[in-house]
Amino acid sequence: MKKSTNALLNAPYAVWSAIFVVVPLFIVVVYAFTDAEGHFSFDSILALKDYGHNFLISLLYSLVATVITLIIAYPFAYALSKTNEKTQRIQMMLVMLPMWMNLLIRTYSWMNILDRNGIINQLLMTLGLKPATFLGTPGAVIFGMVYNYLPYMILPIYTVMAKMDNSLVEAARDLGCNGFNVWRRLILPLSMPGVISGITMVFVPSVSTFYISQKLGNGKIMLIGDTIERQMQTLNNYNLGAALSLVLMVLILVSMFIMNRFADNSGEGGLVA
């Protein structure tokens, strides 16, 4: 009886997953291994060798953005976890506030700020300096990734650190550990689940993004997300677009599998999707 009830309660989620997850993935696989006439073909798969550079650039930019985000988020999350509850609530609200605004609007706003006639260049010219070129550079694209996905790194790390028992730190200090050893031997291992979860939550959207690179890259930087979007929307080459999407999906799944293995080995704490 209990199993029947559980099956009945899980049925809507199973149907939802089948319609909006399994079926779209099946369609992607079908398009990836067929040609424009619908015949079975490896042409799209073989054509992937021409886009190796786009994959490498996407992985590189995503890794750099993830590392920068981690460097910024880790000390901030640690300092935040040591403040009083009122300060934590205010700071968390400020961290989450940009997330209430659509990513497209946030990115478009930075495109105007970094533009040739934007606020930053207007300030530079006021100071008697020459305007700088920001848009269309790798730095602008990576900055856009860091800005948009920084909260996703802060939140899981802060969640883990806020649950740490301060008595463990006190015990480590009583046993003779200095500040660095306390961090290396206690805080860092205990916070690793949150770190791994944050890395996953930043790396996955970064490697697949296309709007950030379109706007802040000024059309000069083609990441794998831009390539897929171009094949689908501009060239109407759904087969090659599906093949590129399939490879990207495999890369993301492999990355998540590796991150989950690290999370399993680091004990309890953060959650990796």
Image (tube, helix red, strand yellow):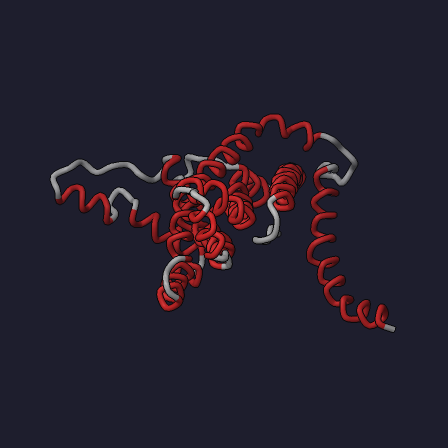
Residue 214, can we see it?
Answer: no
Residue 133 in the image, given as x and y percentages of width and height: 28, 36
Q: Is residue 116 left or right of residue 244?
A: left
In the image shown, does 167 or 204 lie closer to the viewer? 167
Q: Is residue 1 above or below residue 224?
A: below
Q: Is residue 134 above or below residue 94?
A: above
Q: Is residue 151 above or below residue 40?
A: below
Residue shown at the point (53%, 41%) measured from the top left? 207
In the rendered image, the residue lying farthest to the front is: 175
Residue 28, can we see it?
Answer: yes
In the image shown, does 67 or 140 lie closer to the viewer? 67
Q: Is residue 160 above or below residue 207?
A: below
Give the tally of numbered discs.
0
Residue shown at the point (53%, 50%) measured from the top left? 194
Residue 143 in the image, given as x and y percentages of width and height: 38, 43
Q: Quadrant of the N terminus?
A: bottom right
Residue 251 in the image, given as x and y percentages of width and height: 62, 38
Q: Is residue 242 left or right of residue 207?
A: right
In the rendered image, the residue lying farthest to the right is: 1
In the image shown, does 196 or 240 lie closer to the viewer? 196
Q: Is residue 178 left or right of residue 60?
A: left
Residue 96 in the image, given as x and y percentages of width and height: 42, 61
